[in-house]
């Protein structure tokens, strides 16, 4: 759906690109400018956030007659007294005049970079009203605005999202250079279409849509990750035969019935002064086990291997 | 100046990247060692430096710079450094008897709602004015720190306006650099929205080219690792967006700081 929006097949409206400080939506915005210029539309840009050079950077026809940049970057509030356009000029009459004085009879595309700057100085209800009236006014066919969503309260972002006929929320993608766009489009019939696409912006500001189903893409990426249990030098699980052999094995120092019988048969006790009992094997005549009296709980005995 | 940090940032006093806006932020930690680094870095690079010292006195910065091998007093006398001592100047505004009407920079204290135009005009005049005979390099603005302005009653929006004007003048027009420190007190991922310093930091992050975010160790206090710094380079003009994040742990020494990859502290290995 992103490429449809770029082609501008629909009949205008308000398109809002929402970004956060994790991923800037300005590349996508400039792609929209580039696409509109290549269609032959007249484009007016209100630049607050970045200077004219950066906006034009990468455009195929930066000196096109159809591109009019009204830069308020250097002096947006009129502090230096040499700005043609300031944020105070952001009202319906001046914007309409601005668009009408240069363009022909053809309705123009108005790009706002960014609405966040405007919202800092113009009250949100007034901004919404101006944007709504611009669409109704006839001089402007499409308004494309960038909005840094994390700079505003949720209510402000929400009301602008409701006003927008198309809303693109951009976020960083899994891989470098890729980003995820969540697109919400309100049709005139009242139907709402939602879509999610992975895209990247090239240096010549063309947009490549990689996938329409990012969920699958993400799963693939997860599967592509290396399996940490591959190429191990040992087995994590036993096979059936190994498990059987393991169960058969009797561990040393486990006291079983047969062992106790062996003890009673082949050892005799030798008392020692230090409260220790030596168990001596009759056959080999060696001290095989030491039996020590446990003083705290005198009823129990512990076994130690002495010279096995 | 910390040479290790220079190699991490690919910077050297001999070649300054024009138009760079560096945002230094900290959360539950102290990033002022980075301010001292940048101050000595730009003074060594023979830039014309305007320093807005709002949290400490001149003596403090001077003493730290002495340790790093630089004399701020000399730099001031040569006209390389313009130092705004916020503590002193605000006192002369708040107690009118002592007012000597030297600078208009702190006039915003009388009416914080009116914005920071006076402070911007001070910055503009100090970076463009040629008060010295020597020819200095591109201008640099250092602010320590912006969140103090919030405490003084200025709104986050007004501070963002101020930083925008400084950026338009210094970074775009004069091709200089800017370093701004913002302190965040709250916890991360707090979705309050009305927290001024969070909004300020996000607004600056949208404007900047490089962020250095200093945090304490998530695993708690450690004697040999003082914290971690996240280096995030945002896009520059010319190349398309690729946000690179790198995370380093650091230890501040008496005369410098060492940076190392996570888990490679000499105390661990």
Image (tube, coloured by chain):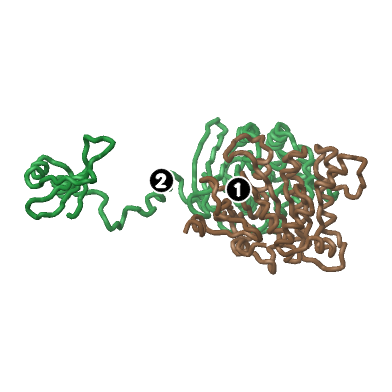
Chain colours: A green, B brown
How far separated are the C-alphas under marks 2 and 1? Answer: 24 Å
Does residue A111 show up? no
Within 10 Å of disc 1 (Cα), the crowding (few <14, some 14-19, many 20+) is many
Q: Where residue A255 sits in the image (x, y, percent)?
A: 16, 42
**In the image, which disc is placed on residue B233?**
none
Residue hosting label 2: A216
Q: Are marks 2 and 1 in contact (CB under 8 Å)?
A: no
Label 1 resides on the chain identified as A
Residue hosting label 1: A25
Q: Where residue B106 sits in the image (x, y, percent)?
A: 84, 45
Looking at marks 2 and 1 on the same chain, the residue that comes earlier in the sequence is marked by 1
Q: Where residue B128 sits in the image (x, y, percent)?
A: 83, 59
Q: Nearer the viewer, residue B243 or A177?
A: B243
Does residue A69 show up? yes
Q: Nearer the viewer, residue B184 or A298?
A: A298
- Identify which residue is drawn at 77% across, 48% down: B54
Label 2 resides on the chain identified as A
Secondary structure state at the residue bearing disc 1: loop
Within 10 Å of disc 2 (Cα), the crowding (few <14, some 14-19, many 20+) is few
Q: Give the image quarter of residue A308.
A: bottom left
Q: Nearer the viewer, residue A246 or A49?
A: A246
Q: Where residue A254 sits in the image (x, y, percent)?
A: 18, 44
Secondary structure state at the residue bearing disc 2: helix
């Amino acid at each position: 759906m992103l490429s449809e929006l770029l082609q501008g097949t629909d009949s205008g409206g308000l398109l809002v690109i929402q970004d956060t400080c994790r991923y800037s939506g300005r590349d996508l915005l400039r792609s929209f400018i580039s696409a509109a210029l290549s269609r032959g539309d007249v484009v007016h840009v209100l630049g607050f956030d970045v200077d004219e050079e950066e906006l034009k950077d990468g455009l195929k026809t930066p000196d096109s007659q159809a591109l009019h940049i009204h830069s308020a970057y250097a002096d947006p509030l009129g502090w230096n007294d040499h700005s043609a356009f300031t944020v105070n000029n952001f009202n319906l009459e001046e914007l309409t005049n601005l668009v009408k004085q240069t363009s022909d009879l053809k309705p123009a595309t108005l790009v706002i970079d960014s609405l966040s700057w405007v919202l800092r100085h113009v009250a949100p209800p007034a901004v919404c009203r101006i944007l709504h009236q611009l669409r109704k006014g006839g001089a402007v066919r499409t308004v494309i605005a960038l909005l840094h969503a994390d700079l505003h309260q949720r209510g402000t972002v929400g009301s602008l999202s409701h006003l927008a006929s198309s809303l693109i929320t951009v976020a960083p993608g899994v891989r470098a250079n890729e980003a995820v766009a969540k697109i919400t489009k309100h049709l005139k019939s009242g139907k709402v279409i939602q879509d999610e696409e992975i895209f990247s912006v090239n240096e010549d500001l063309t947009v490549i849509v990689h996938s329409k189903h990012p969920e699958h893409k993400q799963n693939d990426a997860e599967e592509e990750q290396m399996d940490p249990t591959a190429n191990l030098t040992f087995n994590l699980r036993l096979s059936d035969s190994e498990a059987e052999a393991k169960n058969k094995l009797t561990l040393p120092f486990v006291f079983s019935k047969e062992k106790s019988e062996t003890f009673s048969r082949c050892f005799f006790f030798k008392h020692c002064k230090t409260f220790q009992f030596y168990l001596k094997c009759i056959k080999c005549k060696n001290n095989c086990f030491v039996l020590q009296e446990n003083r705290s709980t005198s009823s129990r005995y512990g076994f130690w291997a002495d010279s096995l | 100046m910390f040479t290790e940090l220079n190699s991490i940032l690919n910077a050297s006093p001999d070649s300054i990247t024009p138009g760079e806006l560096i945002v230094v932020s900290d959360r539950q930690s102290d990033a002022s060692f980075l301010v001292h680094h940048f101050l000595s870095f730009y003074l060594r690079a023979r830039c014309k430096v305007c320093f807005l010292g709002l949290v400490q006195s001149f003596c403090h910065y001077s003493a730290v710079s002495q340790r790093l091998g630089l004399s701020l007093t000399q730099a001031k006398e040569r006209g390389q450094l313009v130092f705004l001592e916020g503590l002193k100047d605000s006192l002369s505004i708040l107690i009118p008897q002592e007012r000597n009407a030297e600078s208009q920079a702190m006039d915003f204290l009388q009416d914080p709602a009116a914005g920071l135009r006076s402070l911007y005009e001070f910055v503009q005049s100090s970076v463009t004015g040629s008060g010295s005979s020597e020819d200095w390099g591109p201008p640099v603005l250092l602010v320590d720190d912006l969140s103090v302005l919030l405490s003084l009653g200025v709104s986050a929006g007004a501070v963002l306006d101020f930083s925008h004007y400084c950026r338009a003048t210094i970074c775009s027009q004069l091709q200089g650099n800017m370093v701004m420190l913002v302190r965040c007190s709250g916890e991360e991922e707090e979705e309050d929205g009305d927290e001024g310093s969070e909004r300020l930091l996000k607004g600056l992050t949208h404007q900047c080219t490089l962020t250095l975010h200093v945090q304490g160790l998530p695993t708690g206090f450690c004697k040999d690792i003082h914290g971690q710094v996240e280096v995030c380079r945002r896009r520059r003009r010319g190349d398309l967006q690729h946000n690179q994040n790198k995370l380093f742990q650091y230890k501040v020494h008496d005369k410098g700081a060492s940076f190392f990859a996570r888990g490679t502290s000499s105390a661990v290995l």
